[in-house]
Every structure is written in structure tokens, then in C-alpha cells.
Image (tube, helix red, strand yellow):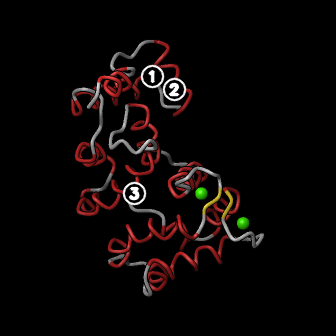
Amino acid sequence: MGNHLHKQYKIYQILTDDTLAHCHAVTKFSDDEIRAEHEKFFRITGNGCLKKSHMEELLGDYVPLGKHKNIKYLTKCIFSTIDTNNDGYIDFLEYLISIKFFKTKSPIEKANFMFRILDKNGDKHVTLKEIEPLLKCLEEYHKSSSNTHVTNMMNDGAKSAACAVLAKLDENNSGDIGVSEFVDGWLKDETIRALFTFQ
Ligand SMILES: [Ca+2]
Ligand SMILES: [Ca+2]
């Protein structure tokens, strides 16, 4: 790792008031929550660069024990989404944003976060090409689901399931899914929630 990259991750090493305020503004976590996560994050990563293997260890706290075997699918999806510059590492703030997804009780927040995970190129539209790889990632997990709507939908593979999701959610027939279409679908369609929930 070059010096430049190293520097970039050191920004969060010491929680100054400014850093704390910034983390709070982005995540809405309390200062105590941020401090606790910060302690854990730097204990595990050492230098503030989170690797995929660290992610599994850190997210283990937010995934029920029985589902622990699925954590690899989960972290793969989340890691590649959060790691926006694709350098293979996640900094402290990116990590905080990702655990917010596991902590929030708000369906709207969950839907918004899932939309961002899906919207890989960040253009605020979710296309077939963005839905399919994520469902592919969750395919094995969903196969063991007790929800027959989910297993039926995944029966013919991720591509067919992605088409079904698009057909369900693309209310204005634009060929992709906007954030309001996704959130609406999430709130009213139990199968959509189940398809994109992996806890
Ligand atoms: Ca997109
Ligand atoms: Ca649309």
C-alpha cells in the first residue's frame, strides 16, 4: 500500500470533535455508539484499512448466530458496494455506514440503504444489470429460505428473479427502478423485503 493511500485511512484514526460531528451527521449514530465502533474498528483493523476478512469478523455482531454461515455472501455484496473506489479497503466512515443497515429499525432507512447497495454506479436508478448480480450473490442463501414466495422467485435463477423484481417495481415503465419505486415496493411487498434481506 502506498503512502498516499495510507494517509487517506489515517483521517479517522483519532476521533476529533470534527470527525465525530462528521460521522454523526452522516450516520446519525450517537457519539457513544461512534466511539464504541471506533474502538472496535481500530482494534480489529490496526491501521484503519478494513479488509474483507475483517468485515466478516466485525459484522458477526450483527448477524444472528444461526445465519453465520451466510456471512460471506453478505459481506461480499456489502463490501463491494461500500468500497466505492474499489481499492479493496473500507475506511471507518464507510464501515459505520454499512453497520447502520444492520442497526436501523426503520423500514424506510433499510429500503434506502438497500437501494444504494443495489445502485452500484450511483446514478439513482437500479437496472436489471444491478439487480441480477446481487441476487446471484444471495441465490444460495435464498434457496434455503422457508419463504415459498422467495424460493419460487429464485427457482429459475437470479436473472429471472431480477426480471420479476423489475416488473414488480418499475411502476412508471421507465425500464429501471427509481428510489421512490423501490421504497414503495419495499414497504408494501413482503416478498421484495425478503428477497433483499439477509439477516
Ligand atoms: Ca444504477
Ligand atoms: Ca421506473
> Mark 3: few, some, or many residues within 10 Å (few <14, many ≥20)?
some
Residue 66 location (% of width, % of height)? 25, 62
> Mark 2: few, some, or many residues within 10 Å (few <14, many ≥20)?
some
Residue position marked by numbered label 2 in the rendering: 24
Instruction: Verify CB contact (< 8 Å) between mark 1 and mark 2.
Output: yes
Report the side of 39 relative to 193 (left or right).
Answer: left
Number of labelled discs? 3
Residue at image x 33%, y 53%? 75
What is the three-letter code of the residue carrying label 3? Cys
- Mark 1, mark 2: which one is toward the viewer? 2
Residue 1 location (% of width, % of height)? 26, 32
- Mark 2, mark 3: which one is toward the viewer? 3
Residue position marked by numbered label 1 in the rendering: 31
The yes-or-no answer for disc 1 within 8 Å of ligand 1 is: no
Q: Which mark is residue 77?
A: 3
Report the side of 76 relative to 29 (left or right).
Answer: left
What is the three-letter code of the residue carrying label 1? Asp
Residue at image x 42%, y 36%? 96
The one of 49 and 168 positioned closer to us in this rendering: 49
